[in-house]
Image: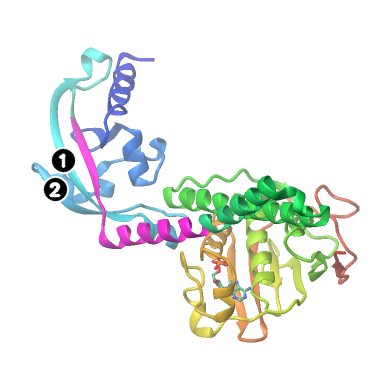
Amino acid sequence: MSAHSDWIEEQRRLLNCLPLGVMLTDAQGLIWCCNEVLAGLMGLSLDQIEGRCLYDWWPELVALEGTRPSLPYRRPSPASAAVEDWLSFKVRVQALELGIELGIELGGAQPRAYRVWSFQAEASRELAQTQADFVATVSHELRTPLTSIKGFVDTLLNAREQFDPAQVDRFLRIIKSQADRLTCLVEDILTVSRIQSGRLKNIPQRLGIAEVAERVLDQLADRYDARRVALDLPAGLPVIRADPDRLEQILTHLIDNALKYSDHPTLVRVRAGLDPEHDDRIQLSVDDQGTGIAPEHLSTLFHRFNRIDSPLTRQREGTGLGLYITKALVESLGGTIQVDSQLGRGSTFTVGLPVAQVVEALGGDPPGSRACPPGEVSARS
Ligand code: ADP
Protein backbone atom coordinates (compact mmCIF):
# COMPACT_ATOMS: atom_id res chain seq x y z
CA MET A 1 0.00 0.00 0.00
CA SER A 2 1.32 3.47 -0.88
CA ALA A 3 1.75 6.25 1.66
CA HIS A 4 -1.11 8.01 -0.10
CA SER A 5 -3.60 5.15 0.27
CA ASP A 6 -2.51 4.75 3.90
CA TRP A 7 -3.31 8.41 4.40
CA ILE A 8 -6.75 8.00 2.73
CA GLU A 9 -7.44 4.94 4.89
CA GLU A 10 -6.54 6.95 8.00
CA GLN A 11 -8.94 9.74 6.92
CA ARG A 12 -11.72 7.20 6.37
CA ARG A 13 -11.23 5.89 9.91
CA LEU A 14 -11.43 9.45 11.26
CA LEU A 15 -14.54 10.28 9.20
CA ASN A 16 -16.25 7.16 10.49
CA CYS A 17 -16.02 8.55 14.02
CA LEU A 18 -18.19 11.54 13.03
CA PRO A 19 -21.95 11.59 13.47
CA LEU A 20 -22.48 13.61 10.24
CA GLY A 21 -22.27 12.41 6.66
CA VAL A 22 -18.81 13.47 5.55
CA MET A 23 -16.68 13.11 2.42
CA LEU A 24 -13.22 14.13 1.38
CA THR A 25 -12.71 15.39 -2.19
CA ASP A 26 -9.94 17.02 -4.12
CA ALA A 27 -10.39 20.41 -5.75
CA GLN A 28 -11.97 18.78 -8.85
CA GLY A 29 -14.66 17.16 -6.73
CA LEU A 30 -13.25 13.62 -7.02
CA ILE A 31 -14.37 11.74 -3.92
CA TRP A 32 -11.42 10.12 -2.20
CA CYS A 33 -13.25 8.75 0.79
CA CYS A 34 -16.50 9.11 2.70
CA ASN A 35 -17.99 7.75 5.88
CA GLU A 36 -20.69 5.16 6.57
CA VAL A 37 -23.15 7.84 7.73
CA LEU A 38 -23.03 9.50 4.32
CA ALA A 39 -23.39 6.16 2.52
CA GLY A 40 -26.50 5.43 4.63
CA LEU A 41 -27.90 8.89 3.89
CA MET A 42 -27.42 8.51 0.15
CA GLY A 43 -28.65 4.93 0.09
CA LEU A 44 -25.46 3.79 -1.65
CA SER A 45 -22.45 1.71 -0.69
CA LEU A 46 -19.01 3.28 -0.06
CA ASP A 47 -17.84 1.72 -3.34
CA GLN A 48 -20.64 3.45 -5.23
CA ILE A 49 -19.61 6.85 -3.86
CA GLU A 50 -15.81 6.80 -3.67
CA GLY A 51 -14.10 7.47 -6.98
CA ARG A 52 -17.15 9.36 -8.33
CA CYS A 53 -17.32 13.11 -8.77
CA LEU A 54 -19.27 15.03 -6.15
CA TYR A 55 -20.57 17.45 -8.81
CA ASP A 56 -22.33 14.59 -10.64
CA TRP A 57 -24.79 14.58 -7.77
CA TRP A 58 -24.75 18.27 -6.89
CA PRO A 59 -23.54 20.43 -9.81
CA GLU A 60 -24.55 23.48 -7.73
CA LEU A 61 -21.62 22.80 -5.42
CA VAL A 62 -18.99 23.73 -8.00
CA ALA A 63 -19.41 27.33 -6.88
CA LEU A 64 -19.91 26.63 -3.22
CA GLU A 65 -19.29 29.35 -0.70
CA GLY A 66 -19.91 28.52 2.92
CA THR A 67 -23.11 26.62 3.62
CA ARG A 68 -25.73 25.60 1.05
CA PRO A 69 -28.95 24.59 2.70
CA SER A 70 -31.69 22.66 0.92
CA LEU A 71 -30.03 21.10 -2.08
CA PRO A 72 -32.19 18.37 -3.56
CA TYR A 73 -30.77 14.86 -3.65
CA ARG A 74 -32.10 12.13 -5.92
CA ARG A 75 -30.25 8.92 -5.88
CA PRO A 76 -29.05 8.06 -9.40
CA SER A 77 -30.04 4.83 -11.16
CA PRO A 78 -32.52 3.58 -8.56
CA ALA A 79 -33.68 -0.02 -8.70
CA SER A 80 -37.25 1.11 -9.18
CA ALA A 81 -39.37 4.23 -9.35
CA ALA A 82 -40.69 3.51 -5.86
CA VAL A 83 -37.16 3.53 -4.48
CA GLU A 84 -36.45 6.79 -6.23
CA ASP A 85 -39.42 8.43 -4.48
CA TRP A 86 -38.16 7.30 -1.15
CA LEU A 87 -34.66 8.57 -1.66
CA SER A 88 -35.53 12.11 -2.71
CA PHE A 89 -34.77 14.60 -0.01
CA LYS A 90 -32.94 17.83 0.65
CA VAL A 91 -29.47 18.14 2.13
CA ARG A 92 -27.69 20.93 3.90
CA VAL A 93 -24.07 20.96 2.76
CA GLN A 94 -21.05 22.63 4.26
CA ALA A 95 -17.51 22.65 2.86
CA LEU A 96 -14.25 23.11 4.70
CA GLU A 97 -11.06 23.82 2.80
CA LEU A 98 -8.46 21.52 4.26
CA GLY A 99 -5.80 23.36 2.34
CA ILE A 100 -3.47 20.43 2.74
CA GLU A 101 -1.31 19.96 -0.28
CA LEU A 102 -0.49 16.30 -0.35
CA GLY A 103 0.78 14.26 -3.21
CA ILE A 104 4.41 14.41 -4.18
CA GLU A 105 5.64 13.85 -0.64
CA LEU A 106 3.12 10.98 -0.23
CA GLY A 107 4.09 9.25 -3.45
CA GLY A 108 1.50 10.81 -5.79
CA ALA A 109 2.37 12.55 -9.04
CA GLN A 110 0.71 15.89 -8.29
CA PRO A 111 0.23 17.94 -5.15
CA ARG A 112 -3.43 17.79 -4.17
CA ALA A 113 -5.54 20.06 -2.01
CA TYR A 114 -8.45 18.45 -0.21
CA ARG A 115 -11.85 19.59 0.95
CA VAL A 116 -14.06 18.11 3.63
CA TRP A 117 -17.77 18.23 2.95
CA SER A 118 -20.44 17.60 5.54
CA PHE A 119 -23.99 16.60 4.66
CA GLN A 120 -27.11 16.65 6.77
CA ALA A 121 -30.52 15.51 5.55
CA GLU A 122 -33.36 17.95 5.96
CA ALA A 123 -36.36 15.77 6.62
CA SER A 124 -39.02 16.86 4.17
CA ARG A 125 -42.60 17.05 5.38
CA GLU A 126 -43.62 14.13 3.10
CA LEU A 127 -40.71 12.01 4.27
CA ALA A 128 -41.51 12.71 7.93
CA GLN A 129 -45.17 11.85 7.25
CA THR A 130 -44.23 8.62 5.45
CA GLN A 131 -41.99 7.61 8.33
CA ALA A 132 -44.75 8.39 10.84
CA ASP A 133 -47.24 6.31 8.77
CA PHE A 134 -44.74 3.50 8.61
CA VAL A 135 -44.20 3.43 12.37
CA ALA A 136 -47.95 3.66 13.07
CA THR A 137 -48.94 0.89 10.63
CA VAL A 138 -46.11 -1.40 11.57
CA SER A 139 -46.50 -1.01 15.32
CA HIS A 140 -50.21 -1.74 15.04
CA GLU A 141 -49.55 -4.84 12.93
CA LEU A 142 -46.85 -6.06 15.35
CA ARG A 143 -48.99 -5.47 18.41
CA THR A 144 -51.91 -7.60 17.17
CA PRO A 145 -50.08 -10.97 17.01
CA LEU A 146 -48.05 -10.13 20.12
CA THR A 147 -51.22 -9.49 22.14
CA SER A 148 -52.69 -12.75 20.94
CA ILE A 149 -49.52 -14.75 21.75
CA LYS A 150 -49.29 -13.19 25.21
CA GLY A 151 -52.99 -13.87 25.92
CA PHE A 152 -52.80 -17.57 25.01
CA VAL A 153 -49.47 -18.11 26.80
CA ASP A 154 -50.87 -16.45 29.97
CA THR A 155 -53.96 -18.64 29.76
CA LEU A 156 -51.89 -21.80 29.43
CA LEU A 157 -49.52 -20.81 32.22
CA ASN A 158 -52.30 -19.89 34.65
CA ALA A 159 -55.03 -22.41 33.91
CA ARG A 160 -53.72 -25.18 31.68
CA GLU A 161 -55.43 -27.89 33.80
CA GLN A 162 -58.88 -26.45 32.98
CA PHE A 163 -58.49 -27.30 29.29
CA ASP A 164 -58.59 -30.67 27.60
CA PRO A 165 -55.63 -31.70 25.40
CA ALA A 166 -57.49 -30.78 22.18
CA GLN A 167 -58.08 -27.23 23.44
CA VAL A 168 -54.45 -26.89 24.55
CA ASP A 169 -53.40 -28.10 21.12
CA ARG A 170 -55.63 -25.49 19.47
CA PHE A 171 -54.14 -22.71 21.63
CA LEU A 172 -50.61 -23.83 20.74
CA ARG A 173 -51.49 -23.78 17.04
CA ILE A 174 -52.81 -20.24 17.36
CA ILE A 175 -49.60 -19.20 19.14
CA LYS A 176 -47.54 -20.82 16.37
CA SER A 177 -49.49 -19.14 13.57
CA GLN A 178 -49.27 -15.73 15.28
CA ALA A 179 -45.52 -16.22 15.79
CA ASP A 180 -45.24 -17.10 12.07
CA ARG A 181 -47.13 -13.92 11.24
CA LEU A 182 -44.70 -11.91 13.37
CA THR A 183 -41.76 -13.52 11.58
CA CYS A 184 -43.26 -12.56 8.19
CA LEU A 185 -43.88 -9.00 9.36
CA VAL A 186 -40.33 -8.60 10.61
CA GLU A 187 -39.03 -10.07 7.34
CA ASP A 188 -41.19 -7.57 5.40
CA ILE A 189 -39.95 -4.65 7.48
CA LEU A 190 -36.33 -5.69 6.93
CA THR A 191 -36.99 -6.06 3.19
CA VAL A 192 -38.57 -2.59 2.99
CA SER A 193 -35.59 -1.14 4.83
CA ARG A 194 -33.19 -2.87 2.39
CA ILE A 195 -35.20 -1.62 -0.60
CA GLN A 196 -35.22 1.92 0.71
CA SER A 197 -31.52 1.99 1.49
CA GLY A 198 -30.65 0.41 -1.85
CA ARG A 199 -29.09 -2.55 -0.04
CA LEU A 200 -31.32 -5.28 -1.39
CA LYS A 201 -28.95 -8.09 -2.30
CA ASN A 202 -29.69 -10.96 -4.62
CA ILE A 203 -27.67 -14.13 -4.75
CA PRO A 204 -28.88 -15.54 -8.06
CA GLN A 205 -28.63 -19.20 -8.90
CA ARG A 206 -30.12 -21.49 -11.50
CA LEU A 207 -33.38 -22.86 -10.22
CA GLY A 208 -36.63 -24.48 -11.18
CA ILE A 209 -39.84 -22.63 -10.35
CA ALA A 210 -41.61 -25.78 -9.23
CA GLU A 211 -39.24 -26.39 -6.33
CA VAL A 212 -39.74 -22.88 -5.00
CA ALA A 213 -43.54 -23.02 -5.51
CA GLU A 214 -43.74 -26.32 -3.58
CA ARG A 215 -41.79 -24.81 -0.70
CA VAL A 216 -44.04 -21.77 -0.55
CA LEU A 217 -47.18 -23.93 -0.48
CA ASP A 218 -45.73 -26.03 2.34
CA GLN A 219 -45.17 -22.88 4.37
CA LEU A 220 -48.65 -21.51 3.68
CA ALA A 221 -50.28 -24.86 4.50
CA ASP A 222 -50.43 -23.96 8.21
CA ARG A 223 -52.64 -20.99 7.45
CA TYR A 224 -54.76 -22.20 4.55
CA ASP A 225 -56.35 -25.35 3.25
CA ALA A 226 -53.65 -26.52 0.82
CA ARG A 227 -56.26 -27.99 -1.53
CA ARG A 228 -57.20 -24.45 -2.46
CA VAL A 229 -53.97 -24.02 -4.43
CA ALA A 230 -53.30 -25.78 -7.74
CA LEU A 231 -49.91 -25.79 -9.40
CA ASP A 232 -50.02 -25.82 -13.18
CA LEU A 233 -46.37 -26.12 -14.13
CA PRO A 234 -45.79 -27.83 -17.48
CA ALA A 235 -42.85 -30.12 -18.15
CA GLY A 236 -39.91 -28.64 -20.03
CA LEU A 237 -39.94 -25.28 -18.30
CA PRO A 238 -36.59 -23.56 -18.63
CA VAL A 239 -34.45 -23.03 -15.58
CA ILE A 240 -34.45 -19.44 -14.41
CA ARG A 241 -31.63 -17.51 -12.78
CA ALA A 242 -32.89 -15.87 -9.61
CA ASP A 243 -32.33 -15.65 -5.89
CA PRO A 244 -34.51 -18.46 -4.47
CA ASP A 245 -35.35 -16.51 -1.29
CA ARG A 246 -36.53 -13.53 -3.32
CA LEU A 247 -38.63 -15.71 -5.60
CA GLU A 248 -40.08 -17.38 -2.51
CA GLN A 249 -41.02 -13.98 -1.05
CA ILE A 250 -42.66 -12.93 -4.34
CA LEU A 251 -44.72 -16.11 -4.62
CA THR A 252 -45.63 -16.06 -0.93
CA HIS A 253 -47.05 -12.54 -1.15
CA LEU A 254 -49.02 -13.25 -4.34
CA ILE A 255 -50.46 -16.59 -3.22
CA ASP A 256 -51.17 -15.28 0.28
CA ASN A 257 -53.10 -12.32 -1.19
CA ALA A 258 -54.97 -14.54 -3.64
CA LEU A 259 -56.19 -16.69 -0.72
CA LYS A 260 -56.72 -13.78 1.66
CA TYR A 261 -58.82 -11.62 -0.65
CA SER A 262 -61.42 -14.27 -1.51
CA ASP A 263 -64.40 -14.09 0.79
CA HIS A 264 -65.32 -17.73 0.17
CA PRO A 265 -62.94 -20.62 -0.41
CA THR A 266 -62.10 -20.72 -4.13
CA LEU A 267 -59.26 -22.21 -6.12
CA VAL A 268 -56.01 -20.30 -6.66
CA ARG A 269 -53.94 -21.39 -9.65
CA VAL A 270 -50.20 -20.90 -9.96
CA ARG A 271 -49.13 -21.28 -13.59
CA ALA A 272 -45.85 -20.93 -15.41
CA GLY A 273 -44.82 -21.00 -19.03
CA LEU A 274 -42.62 -19.36 -21.60
CA ASP A 275 -43.59 -15.79 -22.44
CA PRO A 276 -45.31 -16.14 -25.85
CA GLU A 277 -43.66 -12.92 -27.04
CA HIS A 278 -40.13 -13.35 -25.60
CA ASP A 279 -38.66 -16.83 -25.50
CA ASP A 280 -35.91 -15.66 -23.11
CA ARG A 281 -38.49 -14.90 -20.44
CA ILE A 282 -40.74 -17.01 -18.32
CA GLN A 283 -44.18 -16.00 -17.10
CA LEU A 284 -45.39 -16.95 -13.68
CA SER A 285 -48.96 -16.12 -12.79
CA VAL A 286 -51.14 -16.37 -9.70
CA ASP A 287 -54.79 -16.42 -10.54
CA ASP A 288 -57.70 -16.15 -8.09
CA GLN A 289 -61.47 -16.01 -8.19
CA GLY A 290 -61.68 -13.61 -5.28
CA THR A 291 -63.08 -10.11 -4.82
CA GLY A 292 -61.13 -8.58 -7.67
CA ILE A 293 -59.88 -4.99 -7.82
CA ALA A 294 -61.80 -2.04 -9.26
CA PRO A 295 -60.04 -0.32 -12.21
CA GLU A 296 -59.60 2.96 -10.27
CA HIS A 297 -57.41 1.17 -7.70
CA LEU A 298 -55.04 -0.46 -10.17
CA SER A 299 -52.70 2.51 -10.68
CA THR A 300 -51.83 2.76 -6.96
CA LEU A 301 -51.90 -0.94 -6.20
CA PHE A 302 -48.12 -1.30 -5.82
CA HIS A 303 -47.67 1.82 -3.73
CA ARG A 304 -46.31 1.58 -0.21
CA PHE A 305 -49.02 1.19 2.47
CA ASN A 306 -51.75 1.03 -0.14
CA ARG A 307 -54.80 -0.88 1.10
CA ILE A 308 -58.01 -0.74 -0.85
CA ASP A 309 -60.82 0.61 1.25
CA SER A 310 -63.25 -2.31 1.00
CA PRO A 311 -65.17 -4.32 3.62
CA LEU A 312 -63.10 -7.45 2.90
CA THR A 313 -59.74 -5.64 3.15
CA ARG A 314 -60.81 -4.15 6.48
CA GLN A 315 -61.54 -7.66 7.77
CA ARG A 316 -58.12 -8.96 6.73
CA GLU A 317 -54.82 -8.27 8.46
CA GLY A 318 -52.27 -6.41 6.37
CA THR A 319 -49.82 -3.54 6.18
CA GLY A 320 -50.17 -2.59 2.51
CA LEU A 321 -46.49 -3.43 2.03
CA GLY A 322 -46.83 -6.84 0.31
CA LEU A 323 -47.30 -5.67 -3.28
CA TYR A 324 -44.80 -2.82 -2.88
CA ILE A 325 -42.19 -5.36 -1.74
CA THR A 326 -43.21 -7.83 -4.45
CA LYS A 327 -42.76 -5.28 -7.24
CA ALA A 328 -39.38 -4.12 -5.92
CA LEU A 329 -38.17 -7.73 -5.61
CA VAL A 330 -39.39 -8.64 -9.10
CA GLU A 331 -37.59 -5.60 -10.55
CA SER A 332 -34.44 -6.44 -8.61
CA LEU A 333 -34.46 -9.80 -10.45
CA GLY A 334 -34.76 -8.02 -13.81
CA GLY A 335 -38.45 -8.89 -14.07
CA THR A 336 -41.79 -7.19 -14.53
CA ILE A 337 -45.15 -7.54 -12.81
CA GLN A 338 -48.64 -6.76 -14.04
CA VAL A 339 -52.17 -7.32 -12.87
CA ASP A 340 -55.45 -8.03 -14.63
CA SER A 341 -58.51 -7.90 -12.47
CA GLN A 342 -62.27 -7.71 -12.59
CA LEU A 343 -64.27 -6.60 -9.61
CA GLY A 344 -66.20 -9.54 -8.20
CA ARG A 345 -64.56 -12.02 -10.61
CA GLY A 346 -60.94 -12.28 -9.48
CA SER A 347 -57.40 -11.21 -10.29
CA THR A 348 -54.33 -12.49 -12.12
CA PHE A 349 -50.89 -11.25 -11.14
CA THR A 350 -48.28 -12.09 -13.80
CA VAL A 351 -44.56 -11.94 -13.17
CA GLY A 352 -42.12 -12.04 -16.10
CA LEU A 353 -38.61 -13.25 -15.28
CA PRO A 354 -35.54 -13.80 -17.46
CA VAL A 355 -34.60 -17.44 -18.01
CA ALA A 356 -31.04 -18.51 -17.19
CA GLN A 357 -28.69 -17.61 -20.00
CA VAL A 358 -28.01 -21.15 -21.08
CA VAL A 359 -31.57 -22.36 -21.51
CA GLU A 360 -31.90 -25.86 -20.23
CA ALA A 361 -35.00 -27.82 -21.09
CA LEU A 362 -36.03 -29.60 -17.94
CA GLY A 363 -36.09 -32.96 -19.62
CA GLY A 364 -36.19 -35.85 -17.17
CA ASP A 365 -35.89 -34.63 -13.62
CA PRO A 366 -33.87 -31.45 -13.60
CA PRO A 367 -32.56 -29.94 -10.42
CA GLY A 368 -35.27 -28.15 -8.52
CA SER A 369 -38.14 -29.10 -10.74
CA ARG A 370 -41.28 -31.06 -10.16
CA ALA A 371 -42.84 -30.97 -13.54
CA CYS A 372 -46.33 -32.14 -14.45
CA PRO A 373 -47.14 -33.41 -17.93
CA PRO A 374 -48.13 -30.49 -20.16
CA GLY A 375 -51.47 -29.01 -19.23
CA GLU A 376 -51.89 -31.19 -16.15
CA VAL A 377 -52.91 -29.40 -12.99
CA SER A 378 -51.69 -30.82 -9.75
CA ALA A 379 -53.97 -29.86 -6.89
CA ARG A 380 -52.26 -30.31 -3.55
CA SER A 381 -53.99 -32.43 -1.02
P1 ADP B 1 -51.87 -6.12 2.43
O1 ADP B 1 -52.37 -7.43 1.92
O2 ADP B 1 -50.92 -6.25 3.56
O3 ADP B 1 -52.98 -5.15 2.68
P2 ADP B 1 -50.63 -5.74 -0.20
O4 ADP B 1 -49.65 -4.71 -0.61
O5 ADP B 1 -50.26 -7.15 -0.37
O6 ADP B 1 -51.00 -5.39 1.29
O7 ADP B 1 -51.96 -5.47 -1.03
C1 ADP B 1 -52.46 -4.13 -1.13
C2 ADP B 1 -53.97 -4.15 -1.27
O8 ADP B 1 -54.32 -4.65 -2.57
C3 ADP B 1 -54.67 -5.06 -0.28
O9 ADP B 1 -54.94 -4.40 0.91
C4 ADP B 1 -55.92 -5.47 -1.03
O10 ADP B 1 -56.92 -4.49 -0.82
C5 ADP B 1 -55.49 -5.43 -2.51
N1 ADP B 1 -55.17 -6.78 -3.05
C6 ADP B 1 -53.95 -7.35 -3.13
N2 ADP B 1 -54.02 -8.56 -3.71
C7 ADP B 1 -55.32 -8.76 -4.03
C8 ADP B 1 -56.04 -9.82 -4.65
N3 ADP B 1 -55.43 -10.94 -5.09
N4 ADP B 1 -57.38 -9.67 -4.81
C9 ADP B 1 -58.02 -8.54 -4.39
N5 ADP B 1 -57.40 -7.51 -3.78
C10 ADP B 1 -56.06 -7.60 -3.61
On screen, residue 206 above or below 36:
below
- Looking at the image, do the residues carrying marks 2 and 1 touch, with CB atoms under 8 Å apart? yes
Q: On the image, numbered disc 2 is attached to which residue?
A: 68
**Badge 2 or badge 1: first in the primary sequence:** 2
| Res. 115 image quadrant | top left
User: Residue at coordinates 33% horizontally, 37% vertically from top-left?
Assistant: 37
Neighbours of disc 2 within 10 Å: few (<14), some (14-19), many (20+):
some
| Res. 216 image quadrant | bottom right
Predominant SS of the magenta segment: helix
| Chain part drawn in magenta | 115-141
Residue 209 or 102: which is nearer the viewer? 209
Q: Quadrant of ligand 1?
A: bottom right
Q: Quadrant of the C terminus?
A: bottom right
Which x, y percent locates residue 57?
28, 49
Callout 1 amino acid:
Gln
Asked whether the viewer can see residue 308, the reply is: yes
Residue 94: numbered disc: 1
Q: Quadrant of the N terminus?
A: top left
User: Residue at coordinates 64% horizontally, 55% vertically from top-left?
Assistant: 178
